[in-house]
Amino acid sequence: MCYVRSFRTTLTIEGMNFLAITKHTDVNLYVYTKSGSYNGAESNILQWALIASGTTRGWGEHKFTPIRFDSFTSVEVVAGLTRAFYITLIAAHVIYNKESARDFIVARNDDLKILTGIGMITFPLGNQFIVSR
């Protein structure tokens, strides 16, 4: 799980990438989103909206694996607000945070910042999570 904060303008998220542990292996993925932070929604899938699902081929730990645009429903991040995202795979093949803390800023510019979150141990959600992997 991670989240995006928009500063000056409403942004449209039309796709995403992720780091996969596996390379040249098909992975089944699901992408969920919700307005606000993921805090308090870590174990309740009913608080999340599914915006992408399908199979893609992992590109490995050092190259971002794209989520196909044709399987992704775009979402808006309204200026001044936060939107959480949750990318999950059926098997544990995603690298979700190389940092050791939550809320680490992984990317930022004048329009937005992207912050790290947590990784779930169980699929699709549960009460067990870890911070880095």
Image: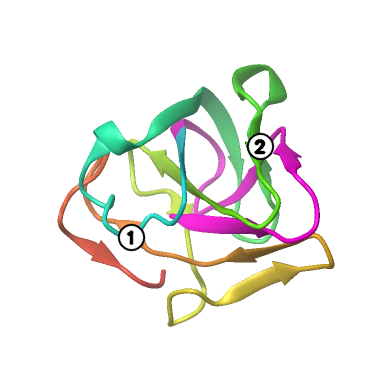
Q: Which residues are magenta?
A: 1-30
Indicate left or right for 4 with 128 as reference: right
| Local secondary structure at mark 2 | strand
The residue drawn where x is 52% and y is 73% is: 98
Disc on res. 101: none
- Gap in angstroms between the C-alphas marked 1 and 2: 19 Å
Q: Please, which residue is most extreme toward the right here?
A: 110
Q: Quadrant of residue 63?
A: bottom right
Residue type at numbered disc 1: Asn
Residue 78 is inside the magenta segment: no
Q: Which residue is mark 1?
A: 39
Residue 98 against residue 11 in the figure, above or below = below
Are there few (<14), some (14-19), or many (20+) residues within 10 Å of tag 2? few
Residue at 31 percent across and 37 percent down: it is 47
Query: Which residue is located at x 24 percent, y 44 percent?
Result: 125
Magenta portion: prevailing SS class: strand
Q: Is residue 18 rendered magenta in the image?
A: yes
Q: Which residue is mark 2?
A: 76
Q: In the visual, does 60 lie left or right of 84?
A: right
Q: Residue furthest bottom?
A: 100
Q: Residues within 10 Å of mark 1 (few under 14, many from 20)?
A: few
Q: Position of residue 116 (x, y in %)?
A: 51, 67
Q: Where in the figure is residue 23, as x and y percent of width and height?
A: 58, 46
Quarter of the rendering occupied by the N terminus: bottom left
Give above or below for 50 relative to 95. Answer: above
Disc on the earlier residue, 1 or 2: 1
Q: Position of residue 43 (x, y in %)?
A: 21, 48
Q: Is residue 61 above or below residue 97?
A: above
Front one among 10 and 14: 10
Farthest residue to the top: give it: 70
